[in-house]
Image: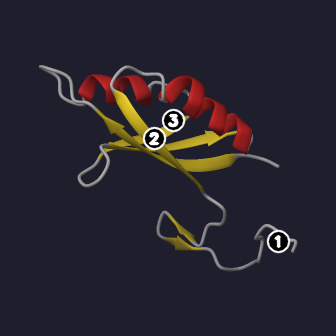
């Protein structure tokens, strides 16, 4: 199947004297993590990850991310199709997943 990409929202508790930094650095060190951003709004960190399968990413979230002290909740969004990335429009083929009734 190739690589699976996901975006994960994390709500975390800021720590005394370092805020969100220590947890963000810990999250960013995982090899699955491609990017990690501190965000404003309803969640604190936005994390872009990749894995070998949906199950691989789900296991990473359950076993690694959600067990970090200070992580209150996670929300995982799997990327299904790319229409534009890094400023380049990609609408050539129709490679959507087949849907069976």
Q: Residue 56 placed where, x, y %?
A: 70, 35
Q: Residue 41 placed where, x, y %?
A: 25, 55
Disc 3 to disc 2, how far (Cα)?
Answer: 14 Å
- Give the answer, above or below, for where 28 lies relative to 36: above
> Which residue occupies the foreground of this view, 33 or 98?
98
Query: Residue at 61% across / 41% down in the picture?
Result: 50
The chosen color scheme is secondary structure
Contact flag, marks 2 and 1 (Cβ < 8 Å):
no
Q: Residue 77 placed where, x, y %?
A: 55, 53
Q: Does residue 53 appear to the left or right of 89 in the view shown?
A: right
Q: Quadrant of residue 69?
A: top left
Query: Residue at 58% across / 24% down in the picture?
Result: 63
For the residue carrying disc 3, how many other residues have a C-alpha within 10 Å: few (<14), some (14-19), or many (20+)? some
Contact flag, marks 3 and 2 (Cβ < 8 Å):
no
- Give the answer, above or below, for where 42 lies relative to 52: below
Mark 2 or mark 1, which has the lower sequence index?
2
Q: Which residue is mark 2?
A: 74
Q: Residue 22 placed where, x, y %?
A: 28, 22
Secondary structure under tag 3 reads strand
Q: Which residue is mark 1?
A: 99
- Give the answer, above or below, for where 56 lies relative to 63: below
Secondary structure under tag 1 reads loop
Mark 3 or mark 2, which has the lower sequence index?
3
Q: Residue furthest left?
A: 17
Disc 2 to disc 1, how far (Cα)?
Answer: 27 Å
Mark 3 or mark 1, which has the lower sequence index?
3
**Of the residues tagged 3 and 1, which is closer to the observer?**
1
Disc 3 to disc 1, how far (Cα)?
Answer: 29 Å
Q: Which residue is mark 3?
A: 33
Q: Does residue 9 appear to the left or right of 83 in the view shown?
A: left
For the residue carrying disc 1, how many other residues have a C-alpha within 10 Å: few (<14), some (14-19), or many (20+)? few
């Amino acid at each position: 199947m190739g690589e699976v990409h996901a975006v994960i929202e994390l709500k975390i508790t800021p720590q005394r004297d370092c805020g969100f930094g220590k947890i963000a650095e810990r999250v960013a060190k995982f090899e699955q993590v491609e990017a990690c951003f501190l965000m404003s709004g309803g969640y604190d960190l936005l994390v872009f990850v990749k894995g070998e399968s949906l199950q691989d990413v789900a296991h990473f979230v359950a076993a690694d991310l959600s067990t970090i002290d200070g992580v209150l909740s996670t929300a995982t969004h799997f990327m299904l199709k790319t229409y534009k990335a890094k400023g380049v429009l990609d609408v050539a083929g129709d490679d959507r997943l087949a849907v069976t009734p």
